[in-house]
Amino acid sequence: LFVRQLVQMHPEPKPHFNTLSTYVRALEEKGFLSHESFGTTYRYFSLVGETDYKNQTLRQVVKKYFDNSYLSVVSSLIKEEALSVEEVRKLLDEVGESDTKKS
């Protein structure tokens, strides 16, 4: 996609072209995007899938803001009531199922 197309995809109020351009260049520097040159403009394309991007971003957030502790993340979510007791139970069930599959 071209930056101009990204601007058009956003709802009102649309971000400024330069804002998105800066963001896209930052993603390119981090290895998530690359580009092809078309005269004086660039068409950007992804180098990683959406799941990989989300996982890497999550790891960075956990490392930067939670001292690399996923337990601290879950604890914070519970304290802020962003995660209910029922959701924690579901997570524990998923962990139990995962452990069972590994055995």
Image (cartoon, rainbow, N blue to C red):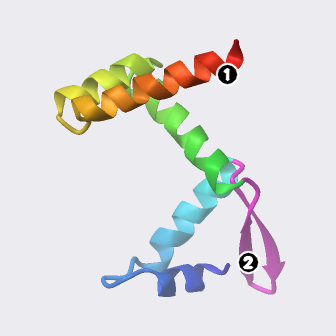
In the image, the segment drawn in magenta is 31-48
Q: In the image, is residue 92 above or below residue 24?
A: above
Is 91 contained in the magenta span? no
Residue 9 vs residue 92, the one in the foreground: 92
Mark 2 is surrounded, within 10 Å at the Cα level, by few (under 14), some (14 to 19) or many (20 or more) other residues, namely: some
Q: Could you say which is closer to the camera, residue 50 or residue 5?
A: 50
Q: What amino acid type should be assigned to the residue bearing mark 1? A: Lys
The answer to whether any part of residue 64 appears in the image is no
Q: Residue at x 44, y 17 (%)?
A: 69
Q: Viewer-nearest of labels 2 and 1?
A: 1
Q: Is residue 77 left or right of residue 71?
A: left
Going by the image, does 77 lie left or right of 34?
A: left
Q: Where residue 82 sits in the image (x, y, percent)?
A: 23, 39
Classed neighbour count for the residue bearing mark 1: other residues with Cα under 10 Å, few (<14), some (14–19), many (≥20): few
Name the element at disc 1: helix
Residue at the (81%, 87%) spot, across then down: 39
Q: Which residue is mark 2?
A: 43
- The answer to which of 96 and 4 lies nearer the viewer is 96
User: Sequence-wise, which precedes: disc 2 or disc 1?
Assistant: 2
> Of helix, strand and loop, which one carries label 2?
strand
Amino acid under disc 2: Arg
Residue 85 at least partly seen: yes
Residue 101, numbered label = 1
Residue placed at 59% from the left, 78% from the top?
3
The relative height of residue 28 versus residue 1 in the rendered view (above or below) is: above
Asked if labels 1 and 2 touch by Cβ distance under 8 angstroms, the answer is: no
Q: Position of residue 19 (x, y in %)?
A: 46, 70
| Residue 1: percent from left, percent from top | 67, 78
